[in-house]
Amino acid sequence: MAKNITMTLVAGFFTATAGISAQAQDFSFTFQSVDPAGNPNFQIQKEWTERVGVMSGGRIEIELLPVGAVVEYNETQDAVGAGILDGHITDVSYFSGKDPAFGLIANPIGAWSSPEEMLRFIRYGGGQELMTQLEEPYNLHFVGATTTGLEGFVSKRPLSGVDDLKGLKVRAPEGLIQQVFAAAGAVPVNLPYAEVFTALDKGVIDAADSTVFSTNHSQGLHKVGNNPVYPGFHSMPLVEVSMNLDAWKKLPEDLQEIMTVSVRDLASDMVAQLSIKDLEAAAEAKADPDITVHNWSSDERARFRTIAMGQWENVASQSENAQQVYDTLTGYLEEQGLLD
């Protein structure tokens, strides 16, 4: 009798264990990042994938690949929609060619003076709904927004203000950002971040809208572009975490909520970590006799913002979606007193 009870308990244990094992990794996803492996941004994103695994009790496993691992940086939207990738972490600006609305919501140059302002708009000012509306036709679900914060600006030439942008060959993402630089007299060039160092070194470009100061510094960009502008005057990108819509719908509600909340944590983590690194890197750069850090005056920043706002209106006229983004964005900025 005791033997039978023992065998029953053992059998029950193995049945229960098998059930747990079967549920341990219910969902396995492959995401591609816009950043190269070893880049600080990529490392922070990797930490996010690990937290998702812990928060989900092992039910979600995300493999994060660096830029270009499966498709080119500006092809991930199609790849995610088709299920070639399950998700991506990338700058929304790269898809401006499909709809100008992507460029306007991704980086309305001059709109934001801090990451918190942009994240509040996405979460509570209508941005989340706009991104959902824009992406679902491409079979993507917008999980949430992150940002690297206010970007630095790398330049081989000294830049004291708007007038110095004239004739400057500057790497910038397609869409609104390129249009703003062109309106300011610069010559925009479309290049992925991974090619910025070589392009600066060989004189293909004079300057680059790339990413935050500390990442540029750690990647050695200030060795070839030793006249950086800091704090940045131009850009703070919306870096989206999105995934295949069909894959999203297969997630149970609790795992959808874990994904959503985890991206909010990723945003806070990225802003905080990169801000600390920026301050440290800026101090190091200012102590280097071969690097001259430029800081634009408030008047020059206002001049650049005026140019940028003129381009917002131009973009708004290019598609129905872009007009809706423009109306929602400017309405929010006015209500919050951010256009003063």
Image (spheres, helix red, strand yellow):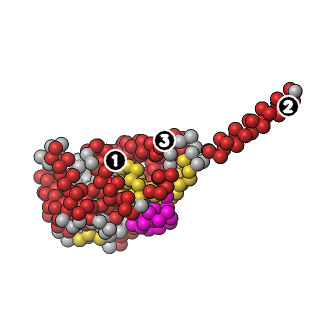
Discs 3, 2 touching: Cβ within 8 Å? no
Q: Earlier in the sequence, mark 2 or mark 1?
A: 2
Q: Residue at x 62, y 45 (%)?
A: 23
Q: Is 322 on the left or on the right of 241, as rendered?
A: left
Given residues 182 and 283, the one toward you in this image is: 182
**Residue 38 drawn at (x, y percent):** 48, 55
Residue 152 visible, this angle? no
Q: Quadrant of residue 93?
A: bottom left
Q: Which residue is mark 3?
A: 254
Above or below — where is 246 with respect to 263? below
Question: What number is the disc on residue 278?
Answer: 1
Q: Write the start and end of the magenta stretch as one range.
A: 67-88
As helix, strand or loop, the secondary structure at mark 3 comes to: helix
**Residue 180 drawn at (x, y percent):** 20, 64
The amino acid sitting under disc 2 is: Asn
The amino acid sitting under disc 3 is: Asp
Camera-side mark, 2 or 1: 2
